[in-house]
Image (spheres, rainbow, N blue to C red):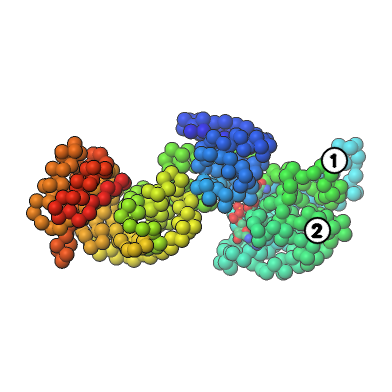
Amino acid sequence: MKVLISDHIAEEGKEILKAAGLEVVEKVGLSPEDLKEAIADVDAILIRSGTKLTAEVIAAATRLKVIARAGTGLDNVDIDAANKRGIVVMNVPGGNTVSAAEHTISMMLALSRNIPQATASMKAGKWEKKKFLGREVAGKTLGIIGVGRIGSIVADRARGLKMKVLAYDPYITQETAEKLGVELVDLDSLLARSDYISVHVPLTKETKGFINRELFAKMKDGVMFINCARGGIVNEEDLYQALVSGKVAGAALDVFEVEPPPKDHPLFGLENFICTPHLGASTREAQKNVATAAASQIVDYLLHGVVRNAVNVPSVSADQLPRIQPFITLGEKIGALHTQLADGPIEAVSITYQGEMADMETGPITLAILKGILSPVMGDEVNYVNAPIIARDRGIKVTESKTATAEDFTNLLIVRVRYRGGENEISGTIFGKKEPRIVRINDFRLDAIPEGHMLFIYNEDRPGVIGKIGITLGEAGINISRMHVGQEPAQKSNIILLTTDKSVNGEVLERLKKLPHVLSARPLEL
Ligand SMILES: NC(=O)c1ccc[n+]([C@@H]2O[C@H](COP(=O)([O-])OP(=O)(O)OC[C@H]3O[C@@H](n4cnc5c(N)ncnc54)[C@H](O)[C@@H]3O)[C@@H](O)[C@H]2O)c1
Ligand SMILES: O=C(O)[C@H](O)COP(=O)(O)O
């Protein structure tokens, strides 16, 4: 399998890919057209913020399975387009957090003490000691907008610098704020009370253009402003006006609406503006962290099907995976069984997790059931990422429930499917630690291993039927490796589930259907 690396990635990451036997193609700085060509025949792409994976680029990828971002922000990836194509999108949250937070603090101190301006002045042969009068941060108030991973570390480091820290983040609790030693306030209070304001929210539809003229007007006169999160969160034209008017005494940006920004960007003409070319994560340590993590995630997914840090499919933590993997397999088999037993298009799927399963991360199991349901019809086009989207688009209603008790089993997965014209319910369990078993199909109790070529027969409960079925298959050179018989005494009927060494169809199937007391015979592939 082939991995395209389209941004600068630390060597340690490349080594992991190569050691796993993957072919690595490195092409940095591609134009959109060249990127479309390069992505066409790769199985994975490893990127940073420099690669724009638009819907058009993603459409050009014929066998792409995973997009891995060696870093945090995914605003350069069209995740909806990836979802539709069934491509897993992963990032490495946390791998560059300390570096980004330290960069923010560096920007705040550099702004306060005019370090970039003083450096430029000295290099120009001047000694302007009087001009570069700075200010202390100790005792000042820092307002942090967005107190997630990076915002929290910025808060911690700022407190170490003896600053008072205010925080605005509608998604964190008072308890979290107290643990961080910050005062949780509303946005207007933060704007009015802060001497420094630093933004640490992601770029989303909601935060695009968030910091604008209206918000600058509410800030304290002479505030200093820092953005090491994402360009586009701040309206650069409004920032320019606020710097020119003196409302904002100084601003530091690590990120820009367009990267790289135009050489004649108006902000570059201002003395009280400092900047870096998106360097927040550019440290030796952070790059090693994100490159090795992203590369390992690619290897785990491509070679072992393990999904970690995906934003568009439920991930399974490494410690949970061995426990839930057998249920993922069971769920997919039950799903596939349902589609092959249904006599019309599937309209609704109701999943019940009983017993020990109720405590598990069941998200991936639900995906596996949907994938199993859709695969017999759609083949390889469906995977864990696009299965829920395809199900929704086909109008399949999915409901889930959990109960702690599980009838006669320690765990039981019950999947009820309504199709146009009827309903089926199939239950399965895991025996021992990893043996999937189908234990009920509608009212029939059985104990069947769901794998390989199978044959599902309804017959009247009369002597000799099983023998005739065996003879018919034997005459056709088909070997039966397993047989499970379930009974419904009230209706005097049986179901027989056979595992055979070859698939049963054509003439042999027709002969089976015509045997006395056989009501129906249907081949299944699991
Ligand atoms: N400059 C760099 O090189 C660099 C490096 C790493 C990350 N980043 C950027 O920093 C961003 C934050 O990273 P993180 O790891 O801290 O993310 P995170 O998800 O841990 O934290 C983001 C926080 O923002 C909050 N938030 C979201 N919308 C908000 C809103 N409208 N108002 C207030 N708060 C809001 C969330 O509740 C969350 O607590 C990333 O999305 C990325 O774009 C930049
Ligand atoms: O979101 C991130 O992780 C940072 O912005 C880092 O981006 P980079 O990997 O392009 O430096």
Which percent across, then down, holds residue 68? 55, 43
Quadrant location of ligand 1? Answer: bottom right
Closer-to-camera residue (84/263): 84
In the image, which disc is placed on residue 120? 1
Left or right of 437? Residue 459 is: left
In the image, which disc is placed on residue 173? none
Closer-to-camera residue (161/523): 523
Question: Can the viewer see residue 149?
Answer: yes
- Relative to 333, residue 181 above or below: below
Label 2 residue near ligand 1, CB within 8 Å: no
Between disc 1 and disc 2, the foreground one is 2
Left or right of 323? Residue 180 is: right
Which residue was labeled with disc 2?
A: 238
Looking at numbered disc 1 in the image, what kind of residue is underneath it? Ala
Looking at numbered disc 2 in the image, what kind of residue is underneath it? Asp
Q: Residue at x 32, y 52 (%)?
A: 340
- Cα distance between the residues tagged 1 and 2: 26 Å
Q: Residue at x 21, y 59 (%)?
A: 445
Which percent across, then down, holds residue 93? 56, 49
Mark 2 Cα-neighbour bin, 10 Å: few <14, some 14–19, many ≥20: some
Closer-to-camera residue (293/162): 293
Q: Residue at x 76, y 64 (%)?
A: 215
Which percent across, then down, holds residue 277? 73, 43
